[in-house]
Image: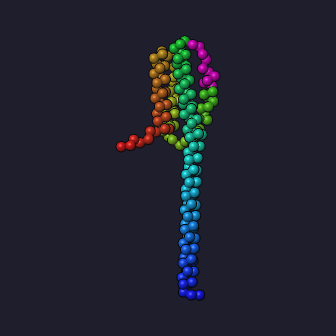
Amino acid sequence: MSETAWLQLIGILDTAVKIGLGAVIGLIGALCLEAYRSGQQRVRDAEQRYRDNLEKPVVEFVDETLILMSHAYWNKLDKKRDDPNPLLEALRDKEVSVQAKMLAMGRPDVEKYFSQLDASYLKFRGELPRAPAGDARDLMKEAQRHAANLFAAVYPLPPKKS
């Protein structure tokens, strides 16, 4: 083989090696990118399950509690004899499940606010039949403050940009 033939062969081999290395580097990059995307998707899926299975039932229960309190308060003011017991029973049946979900969240601040809300609700429920409307409203407002603290703990505001 002549010297130019060897140089051409070396040039072809050099190009083939460069193309092969480029393909290997591209493949490694693609695999790394896919592993990163897959990991990020698992994190997003876990966050979504957390929101759907833990946060959402707690928030819905708190909403239902506040609605029931408001319903009972306004019925008292309107002197209606609408019996809230079926609603109370349904709420009471959910409470244990919701408390378990709240504990699973692992958020002591949420647990504290939930306990305060529960105590306010029990106080409101006990006082409503015999308390004046103003006192019952104050107890309802107290429960709303505890619920607001719970909501703020579950859904904190994002930091403000400067």
Q: How is the image coloured?
A: rainbow
Q: Is residue 85 magenta?
A: yes
Was residue 124 drawn as part of the magenta stretch in this picture? no
Which quadrant is home to the C terminus? top left
The front one of 152 and 85 is 152
Q: Is residue 93 above or below residue 41?
A: above
User: What residue is rendered at 59% in x and 13% in y?
Assistant: 81
Q: Residue 9 occupies which quadrant of the picture?
A: bottom right
Location of residue 94 in the rendering, given as x and y in whole percent from the top left corner: 62, 31
Q: Is residue 50 above or below residue 133?
A: below
Q: Position of residue 87 (x, y in %)?
A: 61, 23
Residue lying at 61% horizontally and 28% vertically, measured from the top left: 92
Query: Given the current orientation, which residue lies at the most extreme top position?
Result: 79
**Residue lying at 55% horizontally and 74% vertically, measured from the top left:** 15
Q: Nearer the viewer, residue 46 or 145?
A: 46
Q: Is residue 157 left or right of residue 25?
A: left
Task: Specify the quadrant that holds the N terminus.
Answer: bottom right
How many numbered marks are there?
0
The residue range painted magenta reads 80-89
Residue 46 at x, y percent in the picture = 58, 47
Q: Can residue 32 be seen from the camera position used here?
A: yes
Q: Inspect this view and state whether residue 126 appears.
A: no
Query: Closer to the camera, 60 or 86?
Result: 60
* Whole-percent x, y for residue 33 in the image: 55, 58
Q: Residue at x 57, y 73 (%)?
A: 16
